């Protein structure tokens, strides 16, 4: 009799253990299946996503006057400035190269206007930069370029957003020096006045020789 009770208890315990094991296994399988389905859904979503196409426009010329004209023609077709670099190319010789872009299929809206400043005298550049800023243009990039007629020049690209009815006015400061220690000192002084650094080049200008040229700006109250 005692033996039968013991066997019954063991049987019930074993059955309960089997039930618990089966339920746990089922729960684990359901969780794994749910995670697998989630991963598959994510993968399908990633495969369905296609990044928007971008239409690029590259302009290369050895005449700065031509660059100014072609940049604004590209802007009229809806393109916007991305980057500028001057240097020697394999077939074009010394050129200034500009890359512009727009979203593929976007309407050809003339939203941006560009102005290119090119000079071998940094004092002239400071004056022209501030005049352009007063007309609503903002600094976008700079490089050094050895042009056919102007010799080695500092090039700056400025942009005017025609949709911006009240652009933020800036005061610009151009720093030009032959010594890095002097440049650091002048940068610190300009920074203490609230000017933020926006661009830097090393160039050999006609009058200043090899110079470090930094551009800074400060927003003005309006």
Image (cartoon, rainbow, N blue to C red):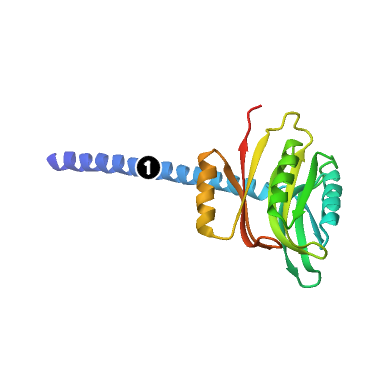
Residue 8: name its quadrant.
top left
x%, y% of residue 182? Answer: 52, 55
Quadrant including the N terminus: top left
User: Residue, x 82% and y 61% (percent of image)?
Assistant: 61
Query: 73 or 38: which is nearer to us?
Result: 73
Q: Residue tagged by mark 1?
A: 24
User: Residue, x 62% and y 41% (percent of image)?
Assistant: 217
> Quick check: 43 left or right of 89?
left
- Taking the view exactly as shown, the residue that stands out farthest to the front is 207
> Quick check: 93 left or right of 28?
right
> Quick check: 184 left or right of 125?
left
x%, y% of residue 194? Answer: 54, 38
Q: Is residue 8 visible?
A: yes
**Callout count:** 1
User: Residue, x 77% and y 36% (percent of image)?
Assistant: 135
Residue 28: name its quadrant.
top left
Query: 5 or 44: which is nearer to us?
Result: 44
x%, y% of residue 213? Answer: 62, 55
Disc 1 element: helix
User: Residue, x 45% and y 46% (percent of image)?
Assistant: 29
Quadrant including the C terminus: top right
> Quick check: 52 left or right of 59?
left
- Taking the view exactly as shown, the residue that stands out farthest to the top is 222
**Mark 1 residue crowding within 10 angstroms, few (<14) / some (14–19) / many (20+):** few
Query: 102 or 169: which is nearer to us?
Result: 169
């Amino acid at each position: 009799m005692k033996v039968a009770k013991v066997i019954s208890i063991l049987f019930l315990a074993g059955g309960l253990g089997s039930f618990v094991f089966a339920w746990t296994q089922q729960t684990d399988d359901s969780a794994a299946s749910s995670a697998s389905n989630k991963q598959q859904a994510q993968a399908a979503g990633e495969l369905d996503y296609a990044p928007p196409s971008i239409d690029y426009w590259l302009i290369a010329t050895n005449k700065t006057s031509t660059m100014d004209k072609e940049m604004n023609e590209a802007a009229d077709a809806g393109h916007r400035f991305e980057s500028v670099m001057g240097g020697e190319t394999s077939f074009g010789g010394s050129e200034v190269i500009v890359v512009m872009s727009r979203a593929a299929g976007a309407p050809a809206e003339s939203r941006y206007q560009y102005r290119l400043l090119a000079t071998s005298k940094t004092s002239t550049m400071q004056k022209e930069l501030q005049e352009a800023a007063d007309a609503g243009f903002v600094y976008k990039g700079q490089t050094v370029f050895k042009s056919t007629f102007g010799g080695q020049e500092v090039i700056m690209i400025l942009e005017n957003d025609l949709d911006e009815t009240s652009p933020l006015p800036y005061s610009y400061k151009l720093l030009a020096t032959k010594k890095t220690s002097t440049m650091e000192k002048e940068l610190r002084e300009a920074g203490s006045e609230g000017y933020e650094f926006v661009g830097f080049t090393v160039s050999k200008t006609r009058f200043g020789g090899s110079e470090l040229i930094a551009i800074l700006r400060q927003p003005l109250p309006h």
